[in-house]
């Protein structure tokens, strides 16, 4: 694929054509932006930033919890023995992840990755500059797919495959084509509409976000209008429209808004005030907004009690057992799968030693200290198992390997048995007498 390599090292031609030919292979259906041409404007990356992340409190809180915990992990290599994981170890090959750019840290890298994945469903990192990593803004990246079928066949043909990525920032220059091995594509939630693209967890709850924002605006308007329910002022039919307009302006100036709330209302003859609607308590506003927050938390994989939502702070949710189970749900059900996906994607752009895999190291994360207590209990059970097997005559080295790998076929017996299994006075099998039978006669 010499021609493709040469093409990849220079700015790529824009993929607006239906197809092109490289080394006799026809590639078509090339331009598939990560923000998705099938999606409407409301799903635009910048729109999510402005109208969700930067202007909606529950969304910001959920993303912040995910980001703070996700960025705590470090990366190590993990040995693989017969398909089973072994010890963690480090080599200089981890340097790009530890210092991805001048002054950058692993936490900075992970924060950017999870932020882009939460907002757009995709996080892109490239090692195009040797020894340095760059997090690419997802809406400036186009996923390029190809097919060896003849022109005119659908782009989702049976042999469609990933050709590369096109990075096209709005600088006025030409876009750059990057090979798959030059890009770590972090897409923890796959998009069912496109094989190579991820989907944001915000996508299914856009209506919940709109509803929560509308509820917040409703609360704000309630206070802006004097923190009172709506009122209807009726005047005598003989009052002229001009006088009605003047009366309305006078009443608004003296009684509308927070600064003029709770003042005594004086009405002239013929004016009648009727209260309509309900206040926030009558609307059960807390329950209405709290239910929406809980649905957002469910989509984010963050229990409400962890992020501090009202429904998570009520009733028995704060009991020690319930909080511990919520913490475990976040760690085991959300964070560890995300760390696994991040390690798998970043392994694409660093040198992983043979017989090992890139893995995350969560041993120093304070949020997971309870897991360390559970791990200690598991190690206690394993140590008792090791003691039992060694006492039963198995070789200690094979006992440790079998318990660690959870594979008892690795056990090898020494041929020596516990004294409880011997006949009285029989001694150990295969051993010679220690005294001369003629002695003492």
Image (cartoon, rainbow, N blue to C red):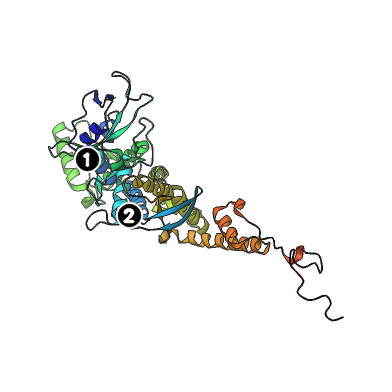
Residue labelled with disc 2: 93
Q: Is residue 410 above or below residue 168?
A: below
Q: Residue drawn at (21%, 56%), measured in percent from left and top?
A: 102
* Horizontal side, residue 368 vs residue 241: left or right: right
> Is residue 159 shown left or right of residue 84?
left
Q: CA distance from mark 1 to mark 2?
A: 86 Å
Q: Is residue 405 above or below residue 137?
A: below
> Can residue 419 be seen?
yes
To which quarter of the image does residue 380 belong? Answer: bottom right
Chain-order first, disc 1 or disc 2: 2
Residue 124 pos. (x, y %): 29, 43
Quadrant of the rendering where the N terminus is positioned: top left
Residue 269: numbered disc? 1
The relative height of residue 120 versus residue 152 in the rendered view (above or below) is: below
Camera-side residue: 151 or 41? 151
* Residue placed furthest toward the bottom: 440
Which quadrant of the figure has residue 119?
Answer: top left
Location of residue 209 in the rendering, given as x and y in whole percent from the top left corner: 33, 40
Give the mark toward the camera: 1 or 2: 2
């Amino acid at each position: 694929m010499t021609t493709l390599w040469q093409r990849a090292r220079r700015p790529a031609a824009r993929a607006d054509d239906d197809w092109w030919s490289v080394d006799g292979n026809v590639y078509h259906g090339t331009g598939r932006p990560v923000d998705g041409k099938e999606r409407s404007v409301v799903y635009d990356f910048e729109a999510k930033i402005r109208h969700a992340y930067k202007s909606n409190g529950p969304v910001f809180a959920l993303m912040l919890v995910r980001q703070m915990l996700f960025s705590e992990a470090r990366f190590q290599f993990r040995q693989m023995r017969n398909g089973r994981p072994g010890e963690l170890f480090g080599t200089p090959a981890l340097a790009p992840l530890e210092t991805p750019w001048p002054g950058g840290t692993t936490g900075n890298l992970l924060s950017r990755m999870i932020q882009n994945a939460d907002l757009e469903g995709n996080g892109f990192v490239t090692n195009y500059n040797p020894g340095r990593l760059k997090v690419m803004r997802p809406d400036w990246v186009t996923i390029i797919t190809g097919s060896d079928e003849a022109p005119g066949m659908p782009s989702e043909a049976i042999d469609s495959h990933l050709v590369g990525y096109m990075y096209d920032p709005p600088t006025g220059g030409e876009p750059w084509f990057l090979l798959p091995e030059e890009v770590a594509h972090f897409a923890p939630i796959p998009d069912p509409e496109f094989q190579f693209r991820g989907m944001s967890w915000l996508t299914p709850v856009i209506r919940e976000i709109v509803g929560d924002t509308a509820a917040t605006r409703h609360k704000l308007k309630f206070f802006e209008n004097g923190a009172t329910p709506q009122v209807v002022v009726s005047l005598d039919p003989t009052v002229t429209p001009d006088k009605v307009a003047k009366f309305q302006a006078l009443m608004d100036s003296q009684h509308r808004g927070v600064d003029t709330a709770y003042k005594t209302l004086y009405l002239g003859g013929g004016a009648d005030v009727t209260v309509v609607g309900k206040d926030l308590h009558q609307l059960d506003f807390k329950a209405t907004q709290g239910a929406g927050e809980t649905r957002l938390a469910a989509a984010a994989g963050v229990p409400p009690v962890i992020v501090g939502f009202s429904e998570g702070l009520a009733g028995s949710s704060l009991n020690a057992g319930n909080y511990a189970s919520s913490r475990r749900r976040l760690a085991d059900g959300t964070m560890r799968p995300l760390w696994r996906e991040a390690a798998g994607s970043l392994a694409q752009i660093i040198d992983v030693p043979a017989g090992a895999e890139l893995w995350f190291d969560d041993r120093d994360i304070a949020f997971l200290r309870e897991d360390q207590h559970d791990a200690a209990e598991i190690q206690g059970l394993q140590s008792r198992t090791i003691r039992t097997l060694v006492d039963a005559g198995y070789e200690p080295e094979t006992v440790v390997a079998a318990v660690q790998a959870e594979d008892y076929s690795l056990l090898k017996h020494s041929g020596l048995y516990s004294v409880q299994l011997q006949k009285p006075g029989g001694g150990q099998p295969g051993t010679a007498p220690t005294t001369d039978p003629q002695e003492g006669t």
